[in-house]
Image (cartoon, helix red, strand yellow):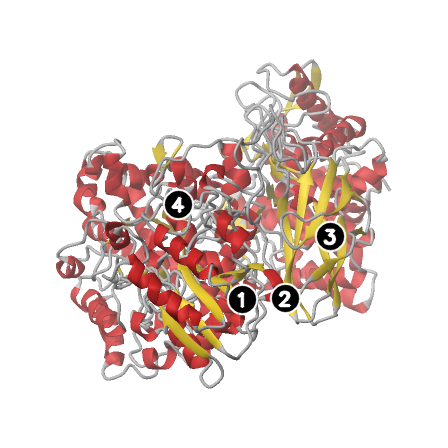
Amino acid sequence: MKAIFKRTSLLLMGTLIGISTVQAQKSPQDMDRFIDALMKKMTVEEKIGQLNLPVTGDITTGQAKSSDVATKIEKGLVGGLFNLKGVDRILEVQKLAVEKSRLGIPLLFGMDVIHGYETIFPIPLGLSCTWDMAAIEKSARIAAIEASADGISWTFSPMVDISRDPRWGRVSEGSGEDPFLGGAIAQAMVYGYQGANQQDQLRRNDEIMACVKHFALYGAGEAGRDYNTVDMSRNRMFNEFMYPYEAAVEAGVGSVMASFNEIDGIPATGNKWLLSDLLRGQWGFEGFVVTDFTGIAEMIEHGVGDLQTVSALALNAGVDMDMVSEGFVGTLMKSIKEGKVRMGTLNTACRRILEAKYKLGLFDNPYKYCDVNRPKRDIFTKEHRDAARRIAAESFVLLKNDAGVLPLKKQGTVAVIGPLGNTRSNMPGTWSVAARLNDYPSLYEGLKEMMAGKVNITYAKGSNLIGDAAYEERATMFGRSLNRDNRTDQELLDEALKVAAGADVIVAALGESSEMSGESSSRTELGLPDVQHTLLEALLKTGKPVVLTLFTGRPLTLNWEQEHVPAILNVWFGGSEAAYAIGDVLFGDVNPSGKLTMTFPKNVGQIPLFYNHKNTGRPLAEGKWFEKFRSNYLDVDNEPLYPFGYGLSYTNFQYSDIALSTPTLGKDGSVTAVVTVTNTGKYDGAEVVQLYIRDLVGSITRPVRELKGFNKIFLRAGESKTVSFTITRDLLRFYDYDMNYVAEPGDFNIMIGGNSQAVKTAKLTLTNPGNTAQLTDDALMDTVQRRTFNYFWEGAEPNSGLAPERIHMDGIYPEKDQNVVTSGGSGFGIMTILSGIDRGYVTREEGLARMEKIVSFLEKADRFHGAYPHWWYGDTGKVKPFGQKDNGGDLVETAFLIQGLLAVHQYYINGSPEEQALAKRIDILWRDVDWNFYRQGDQNVLYWHWSPEYGWAMDFPVHGYNECLIMYLLAAASPTHGVPAAVYHDGWAQNGAIVDPHKVEGIELHLRYQGCEAGPLFWAHYSFLGLDPTNLKDEYCSSYFDEMRNLTLVNRAYCIRNPKHYKGFGPDCWGLTASYSVNGYAAHMPNERDDQGVISPTAALSSIVYTPEQSLAVMRHLYGMGDKLFGPYGFYDAFSETDNWYPKRYLAIDQGPIAVMIENYRTGLLWNLFMSHPDIQNGLQKLGFPINK
């Protein structure tokens, strides 16, 4: 390993010319094999070292810095570094890791690249006010290009914490108060950093790993004080705060940062429910979790324990990397020895870090981000600066513009007055750690340069930032000093008034310094500081037009300013090009289009104030200021100063009434809401058209309105455009009291306008998806059959066309087996596709093309003496082991597949030449199965498994009765490798011992069921999807149809008796079979030992051929439960009402029988096809089954 990295390093001699910008794509299996081999070489200490993230350089956000970093790197005790700036320095340190440590594992290099690297964009709160996802993604893309050019491979962004409290300084780093908008921005940022195509993310050397933060709820701290306690219900958490984090995970974010705060009394850094159960278990996050700065050590102050205790707690909870605390490096070895941490837990965390490095391509080229020529080429370029200027101008929000003060004329004299008017270091805003502070023009400098020869730009400071010098010092840290002026307040004011006297217009540059917002910058008063307010009053008294150009990182209280100042332009902190962008807007080259993403209160006493609040039982009447015994204040009305979504333009926009395509939304449909927007002013401009909904009646109280869509459009003066929004059931969902994600039937107000107080309204009714009374049996069956068909059609693995073993709608695949396909389940699937072709769900030509793809895959896929394995990798056709020794032929699963293929054969054998050719290819596959080999010599029994590596080690001779009858029939029917009839009689029927008359639940059964009195219901299904049981009998069973019907009725009777008193069991809710379960996959059977209270829809529905009336009752009941149980591919696999467990997951082997048996019940199609095959007829006759001619 070490030698490989040394050879790579030879490329770096000189200038590193020739490094590829895109790495080769590799499979998950390649990654697993590589990391398995590497971890076998690693010591425990080196594994712990991968979890260590010390800090270097001069930039820290806490009280600690790391020590002896170089020595630890050489010992393999460091996994990454952060805040080391400069590609030359990073190259030097990476060489230290690669060439001096024992295994040469490369480091991650992280940095807080929050809103730009050296080209700085507006602070994130300002960016969000663009409502322009393309612009936001572009800002992150440029940040990634520049950071990667300087050696950085990982950024601690985006911050997606929802906050409704502007007292909290870090609102400047987020996207405001709304989760819907916040989720869209989270995804745009992740795509910008990592790449927009999730399949190819991080392959380029100008893409860097994102880190969504702060997980979770960091923005909801009590009293707006940083790092403070968070306490809220789960319901509020998921409905109002969690979506942006989940959206980032859906976008493929590579890492997640745990937050400082506690949740439910447990610090997030040590919260297993949060970091493991939710993040990984429910959301399917596959990256790694890093702490915030000293997050592990800070749990000591929370009162959780000493450093060893909190370090073990963090690792066991799901933290993979320790930022700065060095608790893992210092204590994990001891915790492992004492049994407080399992080696498996350490291995998992180490693997996640190594996987991140692998995905970044650092094992192929540890110097991927160390091209020393890139900084000159890729950082702070004209293209980047132009983009930053455009996006900054788009972020500004025009709050007031009386009498058309703006835009300013390009003539006369404009005075820039205020403590923020001529400061370069203040322009980028907080968290711009790589900024070139002296290279960005101040507002005065930028306007003077832009307006040279046109407008005389003058300047006076007018006041200091704050009257209190100590306060100003706290507000101008990290090199962001405003150079406090030692003159008296009056002297500064007199100078300003003298400059103002000579001006035509005054631009008052007031507000906050950049470090008055951001981390550890909470405020209790949000108005303009005292001396600035005095200055503004004096400027207004001059009688000159005043434009308040407001620098801020949060909503401020501007009640007085709104009343007295003619024009207010909120410019946030606009970044490196802010001065030019402000000039573009002030002088009319750009029409402002920003819209607020946080509500501006009238005073601090209204906080928290947000648009999507709930009503009380005593709401204030609309238009009222105060009513006694209503929810209001004595001293101020309830309304905000500026609402969410608000922002003016130099032009005006008029909205038509809303037109709905239909006033009713059904189960699977959508409704289109349309408005026409007209630019009625004289300037071209952009408008953000916003869609809000209100759920008028719910099972829990619902907000007065919620953002559910937006569209930014550009209109020339006088132009009109039609804007449409598609409203689906998914858009109306929320988490109910039981934490189910539901869309409840009822009426909704649909509101569209230019801000959250939109008045254009239409009413939409969502119908009850559970109302099946009007559905005929045929309509209900067709709905279920068609939806289940989609699992095998739309959900098919794209390369093979076969059925994926499982589809999890939650995106969580613990075994990372999304591309694994099933042989047996695909047999059921191709029968389902046949029924879909026959019913016209797809054309015959489309169906043939899919079958040809499937057969082509099967012809090349791994086989073992003609038998197929249980699983393959769909992209390669290579066997995916089902178990430790189960990596070869699986004769039972092969039988299920062949059963389906023979039905396909019969469907096409008399068809077109192309269809007949396919049938002949299927015949070859059928003839190639060596059933005799699986007798393990000449034994009169069939064995389930054989492995080329382990031989017959699985040792599973198959005896009846279970699901394997079809295997024995096919083995006897084979025209090339047919087994003697004695194999069936001696092996399957055990020389008659299969006969065992007995009663269960008072119902007669005649067969011996393996290991139980009455087995799981799939034993009544799998063999009879093609094999027609209707008149099937032999010497051991006088009627297989009656036997399977009785097996079904036993299952139903047990569930109705319900001896364990499970919730929901009854005449219309029964069915125990092998399926997913609360505690993992399990075979549920009608006895108290094997009944876990889990109902699987496939159990009763696939028995519809035996018990049509009873099965249809279950189908109707389950369908009536709506979205809880019925999804895009039909009914979800299993559920438990008792445990409130409704996983949105599917298994192919459970979906297929539903569709096939419904078809057999309706038409007998699959039975007729399979039974018509001459070889099957011969096989039945050979085994002694009477043949109906």
Residue carrying label 3: 833
**Which secondary structure, mark 3?**
helix
Compute the Cα span from label 3 to label 4.
57 Å
| Residue pictured at 27% horizontal, 34% vertical | 302
Residue carrying label 1: 394
Q: Identify which amino acid the numbered label 1 is placed on.
A: Glu
Compute the Cα span from label 4 to label 2.
31 Å
Q: Nearer the viewer, residue 489 or 1156?
A: 489
* Closer mark to the observer between disc 3 and disc 1: 1
Is residue 299 left or right of 1029 when viewed as pictured?
A: left
Question: CB atoms at circles 4 and 2 under 8 Å apart?
Answer: no
**Which secondary structure, mark 4?**
loop
x, y percent for residue 1115: 74, 32
Earlier residue among tags 3 and 4: 4
Q: Identify which amino acid the numbered label 2 is placed on.
A: Ala
**Which secondary structure, mark 2?**
strand
Earlier residue among tags 1 and 2: 1
Is residue 826 left or right of 411 when viewed as pictured?
A: right
Please say whether residue 195 is visible from this viewpoint. Answer: yes
Residue 1157 vertical placement versus 1113 (above, below): below
| Residue pictured at 20% horizontal, 71% vertical | 92
Q: Nearer the viewer, residue 269 or 1026?
A: 269
Q: Nearer the viewer, residue 986 or 559?
A: 559
Earlier residue among tags 1 and 4: 4
Q: Identify which amino acid the numbered label 3 is placed on.
A: Ile
* Closer mark to the observer between disc 3 and disc 4: 4
Compute the Cα span from label 1 to label 4.
25 Å
Residue carrying label 2: 686
Question: CB atoms at circles 1 and 4 under 8 Å apart?
Answer: no
Residue carrying label 4: 168
| Residue pictured at 39% horizontal, 58% vertical | 535
Please say whether residue 978 is visible from this viewpoint. Answer: no
